[in-house]
Image: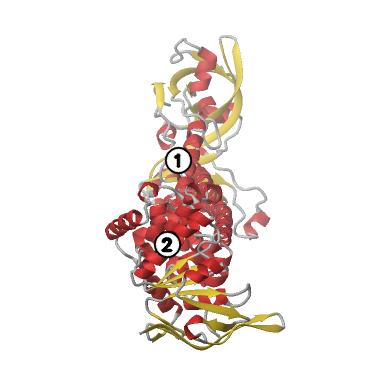
Amino acid sequence: MRLADTLRFARDAATGYPMRTTLSVLAMSIGVAAVVILTALGDGARRYVVGQFSSIGTNLVIVLPGRSGTGGFNPANAITSTPRDLSIDDAGALRRAPSVSRLAPLAVGTSEISFGGRLREVMVAGSTHEFLPIRNFELAQGQGLPDEDWNRGSPVAVIGATIREEMFGNTPAVGQLIRVGDRRLRVVGVLKSVGQGLGMNTDELVIIPVALAQAMFNSNTLFRILVEAKSREAIPEAKEQVMEILKQRHRGEEDVTVITQDAILATFDKLLGALTMGVAGIAAISLAVAGILVMNVMLVAVTQRTGEIGLLKALGATARTIRLAFLAEAAMLSTVGALVGYLLGQLGAFILRQVFPVFPAYPPDWAVIAGLGTALGTGLLFGVMPARRAARLDPVQALMKH
Amino acid sequence: MALIELKDIERVFQLGDSTVHALAQLNLSIAAGEYVAVMGPSGSGKSTLLNLLGLLDHPSSGTYRLEERDVTTLSPDEQAQVRSQRIGFVFQSFHLVPRLTAAENIALPMMLAGIPAKERALRVELALANFALEHRADHRPDQLSGGQRQRVAIARATIMQPALILADEPTGNLDRHTGDEVVHLLEGLNSSGVTLVVVTHDPALGARAKRQLIMEDGRLKQDSAHAPG
């Protein structure tokens, strides 16, 4: 039988039993749609988190006080019970490191802000003028913190978009005097609204000079030091130099933890990538189930059409012709199912993106290819057995069932 | 020239513990162009004989020569080839594919044989005209009368221009009038040179054949060609 005839015959056979065909196509399409949507969700989550992390800055090396316990028991910990704090001078010393392009110390606390009788609690970040560019923050109005001696602490503040709206409403904020804690500060700038970031909501942040923040919270420790390396390649060197300088300053003790943004990113990337794979695996099970259903449907088809198979044999069909016809039918069912499922999945992902605009729910290419491939593969694989059974039927027995 | 030569044919079925001799010690020769009726009570082995002649079944022993070629030793695919090219079947219950139109049913053997669509269309058109089915070409079997269905089946059986037509109770599901029409069609084919073997219960139909074979218990009880007197 010619290929075109085989395909046409298989198509007519499939459309000749609409219920059976619809059900198996539906099962296959649900399987593929599940793969597409679930991987879109998983990969969307990965991209969302990675995107959030990237937005905190580029080529960042973050210094935090204290030794994170990855090295097991450290004899130094037994002697010095509490780690040495990070100070503004520590941060200043890091400027000597050749691989560091700029850096910003960060002290954090909560305080109250008030203006014109309005009062609310806010997160206060004490830092320097390089904090905004390092964190990729942009100003909507005014300017950032002044470039001045880190220990001086002019009475100025940069406020987040939500704070500006709540405290000032429609009146201009830049130039106004506000009270933060027990200090009177002049608003010099307003941040652009960026929405929720990792860790803190920058729209509800008040940024003031680091010396002022330390005085306000009556402490001389830093929460973090944000260091920007000169380039992506310079990150490991920068990390090493930072570590070395701080070790010297802390009498040879490694009592700080230096983490790189890359390492965090890579960890999250790997973690969420594994999650996506796991979800894809679960979805693949539904594909296998769909494949078995196609097999079932084809087996029923063979039983239903035993008489027809006998007739075809009597009319001169070889076993190969019959095998091919049934295999073509199984392939068609799973192909149509896979395509319908792909479209359904893309539609689902599209709806997800419409409902959650921040969430980049795009199915990854590998998942789409693997999903379609598995669908066609299982369809064909599970089509082989019924096709062979059909081809092996004894023509006399088959004809009697007509 | 003998078209069909059966020699010492045995066909044994295993039914549980007992063995059934559906055909036993069968020797038969049918010449090209003959018109043969096979008759006998139910279970006499006449359907088994027909299946055997049509290469749908294998003898347990013995040889079957079709056109002087031993076909019992052929592979299943080679037998399919012989069925495709040399043998046409007409069944009691028509055996049309319900989802295909009359024209598609007639074209089915050509499609299976891999004949190009263009040639198929030409030959189907001719066959439709020959069997007075021009206006039924696009009708599916359930839209056709019994007589029309059997005419479609006969058109299908002859479309590959076989040497042998095997008809199993071709009028069994038809009333007398349409049955006669169908018999005339088959006899017309026979007079154009095609060998016709008809299995039937109907003595009237059997009597029309030029040669009658009476089967009983898997044996050839009587062959009018070798009738005494």
Quarter of the image with the C terminus of chain A in it: bottom right
Q: Which residue is mark 2?
A: B184
Write down the chain letter for disc 1.
Answer: A
How many neighbours does mark 2 have within 10 angstroms: few (below 14), some (14-19), or many (20 or more)? few
Q: Amino acid at mark 1?
A: Gly
- Answer yes or no: do the residues labelled 1 and 2 have beta carbons within 8 Å? no
Q: Residue at x 47, y 49 (%)?
A: B144
Quadrant in the picture for the N terminus of chain A: bottom left
Residue A187 in the image, given as x and y percentages of width and height = 47, 18
The residue nearer to you, when weighing A312 against B207, is B207
| Mark 2, secondary structure of its residue | helix
Say whether residue A393 is visible: no
Give coordinates of residue B13: x percent, y percent: 63, 81
Task: Look at mark 1 in the image and give the residue it sits on.
Answer: A92
Task: Please say whether residue A94 is visible from this viewpoint.
Answer: yes
Q: Which residue: 47% across, 17% down?
A: A186
Taking the spot 43% from the left edge, 25% from the top edge, the residue there is: A192
Helix, strand or loop status at disc 1: helix
Q: The residue under label 2 is which amino acid type?
A: His
- Among the 4 quarters of the image, the one containing residue B131: bottom left
Do the residues indicated by labels 1 and 2 lie within the same chain of the protein?
no
In the rendered image, the vertical position of residue B98 relative to residue B210, given as above or below: above
Q: Position of residue B81 (x, y in %)?
A: 39, 74
